[in-house]
Amino acid sequence: MAFAIGLLVLVHIFIVLLHFRIIIVSDEPQVPCYFIFGDSLVDSGNNNQLLTKWKANYPPYGIDFPEGATGRFSNGRTSADIIGGFLGFDKFIPSYASATDEQISKGINYASGGAGIREETGSHMGDRISLDRQLLHHNSAISRLMLLQEDITFLEECIYLVNIGSNDYINNYLLPDNYNTSHKYTADQYAEVLIQQYSQQLETLYDLGGRKVAVFGLTQIGCTPLEVNKFGSNGKPCVESVNDAINFFNDRIKPLVDELNDDNSDARFTFINVTSILYPQGDLSLRTNPCCELVDDWACIPNSVPCSIRSLSTFFDALHPTELSNVGIATRSYNKLLPTDAYPYDIHSLARL
Ligand SMILES: *[C@@H]1O[C@H](CO)[C@@H](O)[C@H](O)[C@H]1NC(C)=O
Ligand SMILES: *[C@@H]1O[C@H](CO)[C@@H](O)[C@H](O)[C@H]1NC(C)=O
């Protein structure tokens, strides 16, 4: 009897220890920090205080987000938020606009709706934080961090997510009345000019300690309700000329990633192929009705009532994915399903390298 009780106590202690260990393990993120650069696809509120029409800090945006309308351009979490959860971060990464000095060491979200690789991109609607300015913000965040701690080499173990370039098409090249890029360049030349600038920006990120960098390709922008409504698609689901233009850019990211990794022996850049994730086997026949009523051709009308079953819509407004689409993008960029989803690493492997 005493033996049986002793055994029970031992088993109990073992289970408690196991439980404790599980809690400790799941509490600890897989990487020390996680930094996010990009546009409205991953913005978490950096535009809220800017003088701009690129805003989403009003309902129905955030209708399925725990804190409501925060400036995220979706009904719920962005793909960057969801990936943060997969990496083991129990809180959302704070926006640069709201981050305190103590928060910098775990990561910051610099993304800004309307922003592009090019400085002028998105300017017709007001202010936005271009990728060059996001990198300046990262530089000053690191300076603030160095006042708190001497050793910042842990920045090399962190995950860096970069999701930008869509606005260089939607809010630049595809708006010939506002921007002159389409007068100056063919689609092929424009993609090359963009990639050259992007390459320098990613090198800057490397110089600031970024080693594990996930570079997101563009979705098939010609399939967004905005572009289909604007150009018409001849009964097809997508505007082919728009997809042809952005694919010149997408096709150059994989070679760019190879080049960055070859030039810097300790760099681990990887390409996330959003087209492979959302449109496997080139199937472009996704449901493309936005979930909310639109103003300015793309945004939800403030305080309008969105569709009730958000899980049936790919898009929340005319450009931005619903949370469910973001879950799909995040899940397969974290753990690739098809070999084409991520090259050479998915984010799960990137974290473990
Ligand atoms: C094209 O636009 C850029 C930026 O908006 C401007 O600096 C440049 O002068 C323009 N070039 C021409 C030829 O209009
Ligand atoms: C990305 O995925 C699409 C769709 O599967 C495919 O056609 C394309 O070749 C892929 N790109 C790369 C660089 O693997």
Image: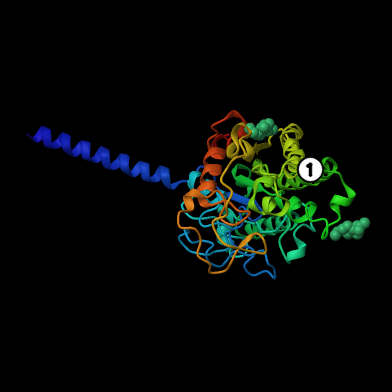
Please, is residue 177 above or below residue 267 in the view?
below
The vertical placement of 4 against 122, above or below, is above
Q: How many marks?
A: 1
Q: x, y percentage for residue 34?
A: 58, 49
**Residue at position x 26%, y 37% in the image:** 14
Q: Nearer the viewer, residue 28 or 129?
A: 129
Could one spot residue 281 in this view of the protein? yes
Task: Locate ligand 2 by image quadrant.
Answer: top right
Q: Is residue 90 left or right of residue 265?
A: left
Q: Secondary structure at mark 1?
A: helix
Colouring method of the image: rainbow
Report which quarter residue 47 is drawn in. bottom right
Q: Residue at x 73, y 32 (%)?
A: 258
Residue 344 sits in quarter: top right
At label 1, the amino acid type is: Ile
Give the percent coordinates (x, y) of residue 195: 79, 43
173 displayed left or right of 228: right
The one nearer the camera, 316 or 277, is 316
Whole-percent x, y for residue 217 in the image: 67, 42
Residue ID for mark 1: 195
In the image, farthest residue toward the left:
1
Query: Which of 45 and 240 lies nearest the eye of the viewer?
Result: 240
Residue at image position (57%, 30%) is 338
Name the residue nearer the viewer: 202 or 65: 65
Res. 345 visible in picture: no
